[in-house]
Structures are given as structure tokens and as C-alpha cells.
Amino acid sequence: MEVSKEEILHIANLAKLKLKEEEIPEYIKNLQDILNFANIVNKAPIDGLDTAIGAIDNYNVFRKDEIKVFEDNKALLQNAPEQEDNMFKIPKVI
Amino acid sequence: MNITDLTVYELKEKLDKKELTVKQITQAYIDRIIEKEPDVNAFVTPLTDTALEQADKIQEKIDNGEISATYSGIPIGIKDNICTKGVKTTCSSKMLENFVAPYNATVTEKINAEGMIDLGKLNMDEFAMGASTEYSAFKKTRNPWNLNKVPGGSSGGSAAAVAAGLVPWALGSDTGGSIRQPASFCGVVGLKPTYGLVSRYGLVAFASSLDQIGPITKDVRDSAMLLNVIAGHDEKDTTSIQTEKKDYTKALKNDVKGLKIGVPKEYFGEGINSEVKAALEKAIDEYKAMGATVEECSIPIADYALATYYIIACAEASSNLGRFDGIRYGYRTPNYESLKDIFVNSRTEGFGAEVKRRIILGTYVLSSGYYDAYYKKAQQVRTLVKKEFDKAFEKYDVLITPTSPTVAFDIGVRSNNPLEMYLADICTVSVNIAGLPGISIPCGVDSQGMPIGMQIIGKHFDEETILNAAYTYEQRVKFRDKYQPEFKNK
């Protein structure tokens, strides 16, 4: 499995990560190593098997659609890197 | 008598008989932490400053009859990816270095309702991604048996703290072996419950379809006792299952006559250290001598399961960790002009290398063009793994394998080789893929005196059978009476 520089940069961009020029070869190597190993799934006898949704088949778990207010606004906002007037602050987007 | 050598069962007996007070117990643990934590580095956030105050309050409640929970006044340590209101929950990541959880995880609520005393938050691999706790952004935890060795991971802080007597028991989390493998490396007992038995609400998500919280304890009885506290349905976690409340200590019968044990040969082949193999074979002979039926069997999915694990776990991680964007909580870069800069630079600067490697792998296998080749295939292999285990459990009550192919390795030797670190998870990951319960208990030491772990795997929601199998072996072999951590290379 060959991973090109363009490909790894595309993936990093999708993941919202920036790779330094000097880190790129190592990230490529690590990704190739694990993909080469992971390719074994293509040899598994899985013809006709369904895709699993998880460990336990547990479909459509519903609860009542009730609004529950989280009261402790202060505790939430104290984790905000930047805030103003009880709101999260971000740079201007328009 | 050394208070910090006692199991929780013994501590509780002494509390009930008023031979010990909550304050004496808490003070003993604080003294032990002051003495040993500089060698072990198990804690990210110790709460020793507030523990005595907590102890006084709990003692008062006990004396006034205001609290009647079973484990009131028993100290505990909690892995640092489990939310504790008002206390930092860092996941050992720079990303969450200053994150103070605004709410409690359901398990934390249960611990608090018992009146247990939280001694602190325990170190781990960043976001639970790793097998040695070396990927913590803050510190390297050392193995109490030999301080030059890793404690395993990702719940390395929890296992090392229990082994070193810094806490009487602890909570860990297990996505691909992160409770069982460090328990094995540190000579303690680690239980990964069936997926859905314990609520994941308030556990910082790594791979939601695999993650499960469980106990790390000195012995099997304590494991059953802590499972009693944390198990149960929670409407805040839709994957938690409605099951009847059980008292798991009742399953500890000290009898395995007629127990049908399968020994899958795939977990005893190439790559398994010969001393580990020999210790397991000896343990299996003990089971035979105790009247269990033992048979070699085949579950030919080990390599597929490992590959599937890394595809599924990383895919889910890449999605779960998408929430870290530098806006509402967590690290925000000082270097930005636009909103996109905040996202990209906060994530690039806030995550460590291993987390980024896994996000990249996860993003790759979910990306257009590769989804069918990797992710979809892995989900089909997951079905195959489940079927193979179902088949095995038609014949056997439990399966026995090593917990890890090797004993604890030296600090630094594997941290630069990600694939090698991944391959060491071969014995544990298939249990998470299939959602089964698994327990690791010590079954001997190697020629260097490092503990070896045996894994016992059970049927879905049949924790009772693996706990009893583990307990019966433990009673016969009495590992803790023979071996204790020596803090070598201090």
C-alpha cells in the first residue's frame, strides 16, 4: 500500500490537522505500515456476512423527547478558551 | 498490619468492626502516596489535600447513621478520562489540560453515592490510545515491580496505583485491552465487563462501540464488589443494557468442578513469549487438577480481529475527537486569524503524535475510495469474530488465553514503533470486538520477577462465570501471598 504525499496532506486536511514538512515522511510510513497489516481484512472469509453495527445488536433505543436544561452554565463556560456575555467567543467569520 | 496492603474486603470488615476509622484508612493512603508516588508517577491530579476533609465528612455521616452504603469511607482512584465534577479530567492530553468537568460520569455518581473517597485522577495514554502509558502528555508512569518498566496501558496509572498500594482499588477503561493488559503487567486483577453492562456516560469517548469502564483491584473478590457498584442500566447511555441487578460476589463459589474451559491454540503460538506460555500451561493444569474440563480449540480470527480493531477504533476515534475544535472547551491555539486557524492549529498543537496517527488512519479508512476496502470490510469481520466466539461458547463456559504476549517491557523500547505496540494487543482486542467480558489475573512471574497475566473470557453478561473461575484459581495459587512489587531500580 503506497500512500502519496498529496494523499496524506488531503487526509490531514479532512482531519483538520497540519503536518510539518519534516513530519510527513514519518506519518506516511506509519500509515503505510498499519494499512499493510490491516489489509488482511480483505482475506477474511466474510462473504455474505452482514456488517456489524456494534458489539451488541441493540437497535432503535428511544426515550421520551423531553427537554432537560443543564443548569450549571457557569461550569460549562469556565472551560471556554474565550467568552463574552455568557457566550463562546470566536473570530469574526463574515 | 499495613493498612495499604489490605484488600477492600478486609478494609470494610475492619471498618464494620470499628477496628479502623475512615480517617485512619485515608491517612494511611495519603502517607503511602507521599512515600511512593515520586517513584511511580501514577497520578495526574492527586486529591490528597481534600481527602482528609472528605474522610471526616463521611465518618460523621457513618456515625450519625446518615449513610448506609456498602463502601462508605473506602478510598478509590479514577482514570483521568472519567468525568469528575469540579475536578480536572485531562485524558492525559494537552488538549484537556485545564478541562474541569461540569458534570459527573454515571460511574462517578455511583462512587459518590457510596461515599467513597476519591484520592485522585490517574495517568493514562493520551485519550486512552496506547499500551504503555508512555503516550501521556504529562508524565511516564513506572511499573511498581520494576521502575524501569512500563505499567502497560492505557489504564497504566490505575494499575500501577493499585499494585503500589496508592489506592485500594481503581476504575479504568478498556477499548482494546486497556484494563486487562496493565493489570497483567502490574500483577493485579482487571475486569472488562460485557459491552453495555456499565454506563459510558461521562467517559471521554475514544471508540464508542468498544469502550467499557471496569474495575482494577488487588483480588477477584474486590473486582466483583466494585462491579456491583458500577454495573447497571443508565438512560443517559443508550447502549447500556437493561439487566437484572446482580450481586457478583455470590458467584464466587471456589469451585470449578465441571467447568468447561476452551484453550484457543491461536493465542499460544508464534509471538507468545515462552515464559508466558509456560505460566499459562501451568495455570491450565491447575484448573484440570481442580476438576475443570480443559480442551484445546481453534478460533482462527486473531489476526483479522486485530486489524479490524485498529480500523474500527481509529475510525470511531477520528469522529469522536472531531469535537475538539478550540471553541467550547479544551486547548485553543494562540496562533490564529481565522476560525479555520483555530480548528487546525488547536488540534495540531493540542494532540500528541499517537493521537494524530490514529486520527489520520481513522480519517483515511472512512474517506471516499477507501471506506469499502477497509471500514466496511472491518464491520463484516466484526460479525465473523462474533460468530466464531458464539460457536466456541456453544461448547465451552470460558476461554483462557494469555492477557499479553509478553510481560512488561522497558520504558522507551516500543514508543517509537507504533505498529509493534499495536501488535502486542493481539490477545485482548477480539474480546472488545465481540463485546464479551474478560478478566486478567496474575498467574506467575517470569525469570526477572515480572508478573504474567492470564485472561479468562466469558459469554455476554456472564461475568459470574469468569469471576468464579478467576476466584477459584486465585484461592488455590495465592499469588499475592507469594509475590509483591519490589520497586526494583529505585
Image: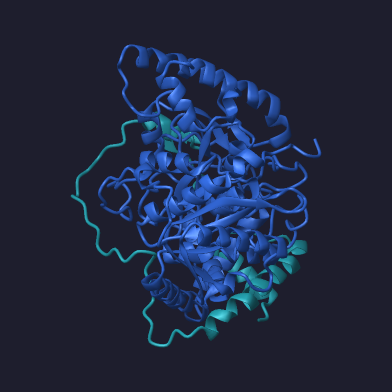
Chain colours: A cyan, B blue
**Which quadrant: the N terminus of chain B?**
top right
Q: Which residue sits at x=61%, y=32%? A: B165
Drawn side of residue B320 relative to residue B236, left or right: right
Q: Which residue sits at x=69%, y=55%? A: B407
Residue B301 image position (x, y, % from top left) = 52, 76
**Which quadrant: the C terminus of chain B?**
top right
Residue A87 image position (x, y, % from top left) = 41, 36
Towards the viewer: A61 or B185: B185
Towards the viewer: B435 or A82: B435
Q: How many marks?
A: 0
Residue B337 is at least partly visible in this image: no
Q: Is residue B132 above or below residue B110?
A: below
Q: Is residue B7 above or below residue B172?
A: above
Residue B159 image position (x, y, % from top left) = 59, 43
Residue B164 image position (x, y, % from top left) = 64, 35
Q: Residue furthest right?
A: B489
Q: Which residue sits at x=42%, y=39%? A: B226
Drawn side of residue B80 relative to residue B148, left or right: left
Residue B392 is at least partly visible in this image: yes
Drawn side of residue B476 relative to residue B386, left or right: right
Q: Is residue B138 above or below residue B346?
A: above
What is the quadrant of residue B268 in the picture?
bottom right
Q: Is residue B216 above or below residue A25?
A: above
Q: Residue furthest bottom?
A: A47
